[in-house]
Image (tube, grey):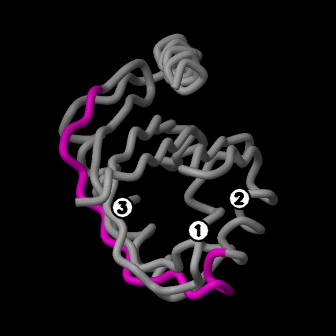
Amino acid sequence: MGRIIIGVALALTIAASAGPGRAADSQELMAAAAAIGRSYDENYNAGNAAGMAALYAEDATFVSPVATIAGRPAIEAYYRGRFAAGATGHTTRIVSVQPMGEGGYGIGQFSVHAPGPDGQMRELHGNLVTIYQHEGGAWHMRLLIASLAPPK
């Protein structure tokens, strides 16, 4: 947990100290986060690993509940494995965003159908912390941290 907090603090510092440019505002960031969330769900549910990886910055990090994956090629490989295992039915809901520099962060929730340790499909729910980066005229995820909600 301490590594996640340090990672989020570092990413927020990077987002806040981004180079010169136009600062994001709340409406723009919420629209971008919602669009990325829709694209995430569409690509996930279509089993499109390359489309998933394209949503991330080239040097992005994804902290899943089970692994930390760094860089677009590794993120694409991760999703290929998820889809091969049968994961589908992903939904994302963005709860709030906070602009910082040319990007910002968002808090959200997700649900997904994925195989459990026993191989049986189950519906999982969790929370998301996402660092968004606006670069080269497009929005990407710089850091995504997903945590699972405790079973009920």
Q: Secondary structure at mark 2?
A: helix
Residue type (three-letter) at the residue carrying disc 1? Met
Residue type (three-letter) at the residue carrying disc 2? Ile
* Residue carrying label 3: 37
Please say whether residue 21 is visible from this viewpoint: yes
Residue at position x 51%, y 36% in the image = 133
Position of residue 45 measured from the top left corner of the image (x, y, whole percent): 45, 84
What segment is highlighted magenta in the picture?
A: 82-98
Mark closest to the chain's N terminus, 2 or 1: 1
Residue at position x 61%, y 47% in the image = 62
Residues at discs 2 and 1 in contact (Cβ within 8 Å) = yes
Q: Secondary structure at mark 3?
A: helix
**Quarter-wise, where is residue 36 in the image?**
bottom left
Position of residue 12 measured from the top left corner of the image (x, y, whole percent): 48, 19
Position of residue 11 measured from the top left corner of the image (x, y, whole percent): 55, 22
Q: Nearer the viewer, residue 148 or 132?
A: 148
Q: Secondary structure at mark 1?
A: helix
Residue 37 on the magenta segment: no
* Residue carrying label 2: 75
In space, the residues marked 3 and 2 are separated at their CA atoms by 16 Å
Please say whether residue 18 is visible from this viewpoint: no
Q: Nearer the viewer, mark 2 or mark 1?
A: 2
* Residue carrying label 1: 52
- The reply, left or right, for residue 83 in relation to residue 41 is right
